[in-house]
Image (cartoon, rainbow, N blue to C red):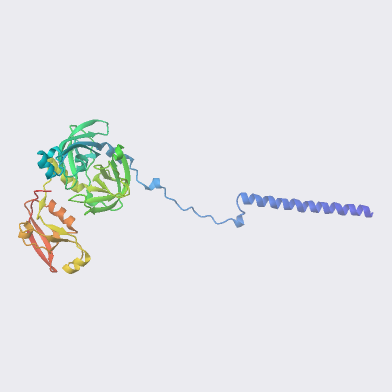
Amino acid sequence: MTRRFLSIVLLLVSFVTGLLVANRFREVTEAGAQTQGQAPAQSRPPVTSPVPVSSPAATLTDFSRIAERIIPAVVNISSQQVVRRQVPVDPFFGSLFGDPDAFFGPRRGVENSLGSGVIVSNDGYILTNNHVVTGEARRVTIEQLDVTVALADKREMRADVIGVDPATDLAVLKIRANNLPTIPWGDSSKLKVAEWVLAVGNPYQLSQTVTLGIVSAVGRTNLGVSSYEDFIQTDAAINPGNSGGALVNARGELIGINTVIFSQSGGYQGIGFAVSSNLARRVVNDLQQYQEVRRGTIGPDQYAPLSTRMAEELGTPDTRGALAYRMYRNSPAYTNGMRPGDVVVSFNGTTVEDPGHLSRLVSDAAIGSTASVTVIRDGRRVDLKIPVVRLTRN
């Protein structure tokens, strides 16, 4: 009896133990499944909507169609100049040998330059930089000039130089061709900082290169690049060979001619400058019509920018304006009342920002007209009437 009772007890204990182990195994299995899958309903975190992430492809304008239109209107320009340099003659050797040129006279040489250009009319007029056509050399006489234009369709042809304007570093060429692709003119005065722009050219002889950037600044002057400056600053990559190429806005309009870069290495550093289209368009029209740029002047006089201290001493409200510091007695400005020490603050109703701005306003004024000029003299405003005459030298 006792042995049977013990057997029954052991059987019950084994059964209960089996149930406990099976139940524990089920709990462990369910816990593992919850870890790899979804959490139980009571511990599931609240569902939140994902934060929308804007795709760059969805927000950035597609410029491919614009590039397709403008690339054919940008050309490659190569120029060869036969130049003559006047080397100073040693008077001793000159008198000793009789012919100073035999030892120290003029030296001839061949120079080459490369750059880009923009077709501005379908009958073959091309706008580029003066230094692309005549080279970087200064104080030399060009005895022979050969310019070749390579079109986007691989055709090459000789170009005639219609005119050059060193004062703005622009030049106009003409090739004998018709039905050429062009880039429409844009209004550079409407440009805004941070607006998208494309630079098209032939950097390092890599034809038809397009780079993208923004307008970094407008109306840049006093860079020391040319006499009449109205530059658009951009961070679109501009490198050697881009000179004379197109700067185009997001509408495919020509708003600048790439001209110069700021670089300590000779390559791209994010600072490039283009001549504004409004200034370039006027130069093109004059060179086509007169083979020179006709400018007005009220000088020749010299003007300086104002510092804060100078403005306080001269009684001007701020540093805007141009200080007349050297004047000629026969200049239109002097003979009509302007004096050294006057600060020109307005020209034909436009506020003068600095000497470069005044120079552009005067040069754009109609030759033969009478300009309304306001100056500040000893803290008082004085209104003058000064005739605008033709500038005889750039």
How far across and down, in percent of the image, does residue 314 sit?
16, 67
**Could you say which quadrant of the image residue 103 lies in?**
top left
Q: Residue furthest right?
A: 1
Q: Residue at x 9, y 42 (%)?
A: 95
144 left or right, relative to 61: left
Q: Residue furthest front?
A: 96
**Could you say which quadrant of the image residue 382 lies in?**
bottom left
**Quadrant position of the N terminus in the picture:** bottom right
How far across and down, in percent of the image, does residue 166 sit?
17, 45
**Could you say which quadrant of the image residue 198 lies in?**
top left
How far across and down, in percent of the image, does residue 348 sit?
12, 57
215 left or right, relative to 45: left
How far across and down, in percent of the image, does residue 174 sit?
17, 36
Q: Residue at x 10, y 48 (%)?
A: 393
Relative to 60, say whether 314 is above or below.
Answer: below
What is the number of callouts on the image?
0
Q: Residue at x 56, y 56 (%)?
A: 45
Residue placed most toward the observer, 154 or 182: 154
Report if residue 178 is visible in the image. Answer: no
Report if residue 22 is visible in the image. Answer: yes
